[in-house]
Image (tube, rainbow, N blue to C red):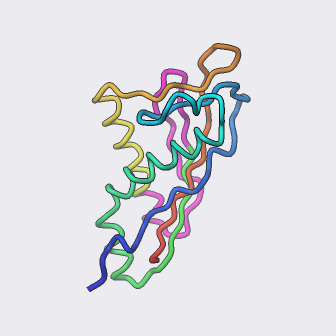
Amino acid sequence: MKKIFICSFLLLAGMAFAQNEARISPVFPGCSDDVRIDFEKSENCINNQLSSQIADYLTDFAEKLTEEGIAEAEAVLKYTIDKNGKITDIQISKGSHPELGKRAKSALQEISDQMQKNGKIIQPAELHGTPIDLKMKLPVKFQIQ
């Protein structure tokens, strides 16, 4: 019997664009404040935090794909970290497996809802000292390793 989390969901570097150039990067709960001045460190920390949380939500989906003999699937989510530090406007940009995009979007929405319920917010990006909305990309890849 295969162990399911030999299958993994990887969130690849994806904080590739911003509607406004952020001078101070967002900080996800659990990331250190020193990432605010380094966009790449901020991106890596956000992706690592979301990666582990999304993987928890998609365990049953990993089993389904494995049973169907699918070794890889990919989807890209677009979302915004708004000026209040909330994840909003989650959209599926593309997905090679139709269900992965839907499930990943639902998982990210649930993570956002839980963060708000628990009073956890992302420190928003700032431009000239003013919090701004920051558009993000989040590639989600299922792959049997």
The span picked out in magenta is 79-102
Q: Residue most toward the left?
A: 1
124 above or below 46?
above
Q: Quadrant of residue 125?
A: top right
Q: Residue most toward the right?
A: 21
139 above or below 29?
below
**Number of dots carrying numbers:** 0
Quarter occupied by the N terminus: bottom left
Q: Picture coordinates of residue 43 (x, y %)?
A: 59, 43
Magenta span includes 88: yes
120 above or below 101?
above
Q: Picture coordinates of residue 29 (x, y %)?
A: 42, 33
Q: Residue at x 47, y 80 (%)?
A: 71
Q: Residue most toward the top?
A: 129
Q: Residue at x 69, y 41 (%)?
A: 17
Q: Residue at x 51, y 64 (%)?
A: 141
Magenta span includes 118: no
Q: Residue at x 55, y 63 (%)?
A: 95
Q: Quadrant of residue 36?
A: top right
